Image: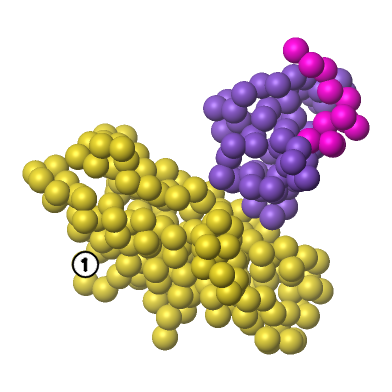
Chain colours: A yellow, B purple
Amino acid sequence: MAKVAREMVEKSGINVDQLVELLVKNAAAELTTYYYYTILRFNLIGLEGEGIKEIAEAARIEDRNHFEALVPRIYELGGKIPEDMKAFHDASACPPAKLPKDPTDIQAMLKVLVDAERCAVRGYTHVCNLTAGKDHRTYDLSQAILNEEIEHESWFSEFLGEGPSGHFMRRGETSPFVSKFLR
Amino acid sequence: MKEFSKEELARYDGRNGFPAYVAYKGKVYDVTGSFLWKDGGHQVLHRAGADLTDALEQAPHDGDVLEKFPIVGTIRHVRTEPS
């Protein structure tokens, strides 16, 4: 645990235990989304599905990166992730991004993907709001993750016909915002 | 439709076998079945069995997220809108 770092956050008025619990829930959402997106990606097939597969893969890898980036902060603040994987899954801040009943229904698949990203955007906005001007490191991390989640949402939203994403796909490395926390 | 007092609503906190009810703008919703309200807790900071009208103003989503849940009653002390 980073004792003084935790003290500084406590002194800023943040309930650190609550913050840690929130970070654990978001870490759980990232890891479970990585898992469920693996299944979705394998089922994105055919003329329609193949066009989305690469973006789903980028989102999948970046969600795993978010998990990797969040866990050190949880331990720095004196928290830990559950020993029981099932408990971790059930603590997720977002519902499971399960394969739709008809896995050939690409619109239903996109809906699952965009709903998962929207849940994440809300979650990290919440963490940013709680930590802004108080816990600089958690804010910086959450803001970096938020940047990537917003891009994921806009990619899938574009495929759903909701309008242009405003972005290209990743060119080269994944996690342009979060990579600094992964070194 | 049942009318809940604040004290009655507090019993429906999603624990000890009780369903999870939350109030919003005078209506009481049953959120028991939601993945996001397991054991009556939501995103660490919120508990079922309470009027969340004020809390929802700070939330990163609108009150319309509650529309998919069944309405089980109304709450007696409705928060008045500022004039």
- Residue at the image position 28 percent from the left and 52 percent from the top: A40
Residue, far top = B1
Residue A49 x %, y %: 16, 46
Kindly tell me whether residue A22 is visible in this rendering. Answer: yes
Q: Which of A97 and B79 is in front in this view?
A: A97
Residue A168 on the magenta span: no
Q: Is residue A167 above or below residue A114?
A: below
In the image: residue A17, left or right of residue A62:
right
Residue, far left = A47
- Residue at the image position 77 percent from the left and 19 percent from the top: B74
The image quadrant of residue B24 is: top right
- Residue at the image position 67 percent from the left and 30 percent from the top: B30
Question: Disc 1 designates what residue?
Answer: A171
Residue B6 on the magenta span: yes
Q: Nearer the viewer, residue B4 or A115?
A: B4
In the image: residue B39, left or right of residue A56:
right
Residue A120 x %, y %: 48, 53
Q: Is mark 1 on a helix, strand or loop?
A: loop
In the image: residue B10, left or right of residue A83:
right
In the image: residue A106, left or right of residue B4:
left
Task: Specify the subunit that label 1 lies on.
Answer: A
Kindly tell me whether residue A106 is visible in this rendering. Answer: no
Residue A77 x %, y %: 68, 78
Quadrant the N terminus of chain B occupies: top right
- Residue at the image position 55 percent from the left and 56 percent from the top: A90
> What amino acid does circle 1 point to?
Arg
Region of the chain picked out in magenta, as a range: B1-12
Q: Is residue A42 above or below residue B70?
A: below
